């Protein structure tokens, strides 16, 4: 839940999802606002109840936006470009025919057609496995790096030697560009959905482990300020990546939250439903490190977008 200071203006409650990006900043990934009757009264939105009386509506506002696309890229990308989780990938598998000689073209293309037809019978994530057949007249290396940058989950290279052996040459985007594996066509088709799920699970586990490694429990104001302080750099260089999520107690005072925001550009991102899932926190009440006053539970502090 959002604090009073971060709550949507006019809402009774605001609930959210906060994601950690690779620069350790928080990105608000989705919010739900319970507006009570406040907006209904302002806009005169009414309904008739079971007894025929007119009442003001109880309203909500919720949803997600295109920032989730940016959040997905920022969470999973590497220095080579995007890494698209298979569940949301426009195409799951890219097939790249390797055509060095004209006399082998028909044989390679026929093999690729057979592969595509076989994959059409397989389902992943509630939809038929999506295949992109890249027959563009480009150098193989150019094609490969275009698909790497776009984050395609699986790339398959098929050349004359692969056709002769009944194989496909597979590269996964969650592994290095040179990390490739040769599989029999039938073997790959049967395993395709499982491989995609393995990539999906691996990306999620990696992001979750990154968040856990960069979430810290802090109990003193001095340590809190030191943790979020921007490192000094020479010659106006960009400050290195620093900070992360902090689980610290908070007395709920909006003025205190505003003071910390002005000092450090840090805010309470949310009051977690279960802090024990984020850190080694017993969930018990404690003491606000900034005021010494009682605190019901720890909250998540972070720099954010």
Image: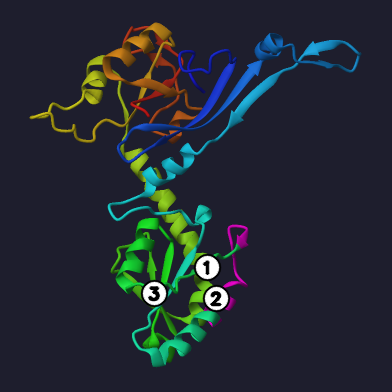
Q: Are marks 1 and 2 in contact (CB under 8 Å)?
A: yes
For the residues carrying marks 2 and 3, which lies nearer the camera in this image?
3
Coordinates of residue 73 in the picture (x, y in percent): 40, 46
Q: Pick whichever of labels 1 and 2 is earlier in the sequence.
A: 2
Instruction: Report helix, strand or loop for mark 3.
Output: loop
Which of the 4 image quadrants contains residue 237? Answer: top left
Disc marking residue 116: 2
Question: For the residue carrying disc 2, how many other residues have a C-alpha within 10 Å: few (<14), some (14-19), or many (20+)?
Answer: some
Coordinates of residue 124 in the picture (x, y in percent): 57, 62
Instruction: Report helix, strand or loop for mark 2.
Output: helix
In front here: 104 or 130?
A: 104
Disc marking residue 28: none
Instruction: Report helix, strand or loop for mark 1.
Output: strand
* Residue tagged 3: 137
**What residue sits 18% from the left and 33% below the top?**
238
78 left or right of 235?
right
Q: What stretch is highlighted in magenta?
A: 114-127
Using the numbered discs, state the Cα–Cα distance from disc 3 to disc 1 in whole angstroms: 18 Å
The type of colouring in the image is rainbow
* Residue tagged 1: 131
Which of the 4 image quadrants contains residue 48? Answer: top right
Question: Is 253 located above or below residue 170 in the figure?
Answer: above
User: Which residue is most to the front?
Assistant: 137
**What residue sits 48% from the left and 67% below the top?**
93
**What residue sits 58% from the left and 18% below the top?**
13
Q: Does the magenta stretch include residue 120?
A: yes
């Amino acid at each position: 839940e959002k604090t009073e200071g971060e709550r949507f203006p006019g809402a009774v409650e605001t609930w959210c999802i906060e994601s950690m990006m690779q620069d350790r900043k928080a990105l608000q990934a989705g919010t739900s606002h319970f507006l009570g009757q406040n907006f209904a009264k302002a806009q005169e939105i009414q309904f008739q109840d079971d007894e025929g009386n007119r009442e003001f509506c109880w309203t909500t506002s919720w949803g997600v936006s295109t920032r989730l696309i940016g959040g997905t890229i920022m969470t999973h990308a590497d220095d080579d470009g995007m890494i698209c989780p298979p569940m949301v990938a426009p195409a799951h598998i890219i097939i790249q025919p390797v055509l060095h000689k004209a006399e082998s073209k028909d044989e390679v293309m026929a093999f690729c057609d057979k592969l595509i037809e076989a994959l059409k019978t397989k389902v992943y994530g509630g939809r038929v496995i999506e295949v992109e057949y890249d027959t563009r007249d480009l150098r193989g290396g150019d094609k490969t790096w275009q698909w790497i940058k776009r984050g395609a989950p699986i790339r398959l290279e098929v050349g004359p030697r692969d056709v002769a052996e009944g194989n496909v040459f597979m590269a996964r985007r969650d592994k290095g560009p040179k990390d490739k594996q040769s599989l029999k066509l039938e073997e790959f088709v049967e395993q395709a959905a499982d491989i995609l799920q393995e990539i999906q699970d691996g990306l999620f586990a990696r992001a979750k482990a990154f968040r856990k490694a960069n979430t810290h429990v802090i109990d003193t104001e001095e340590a809190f300020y030191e943790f979020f302080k921007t490192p000094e750099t020479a010659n106006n260089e960009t400050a290195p990546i620093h900070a992360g999520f902090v689980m610290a107690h908070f007395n709920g005072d909006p003025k205190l939250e505003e003071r910390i925001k002005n000092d450090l550009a840090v805010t309470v991102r949310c009051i977690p439903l279960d802090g024990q899932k984020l850190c080694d926190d017993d969930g018990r009440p404690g003491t606000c490190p900034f005021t010494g006053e009682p605190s019901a539970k720890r909250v998540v502090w972070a720099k954010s977008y």
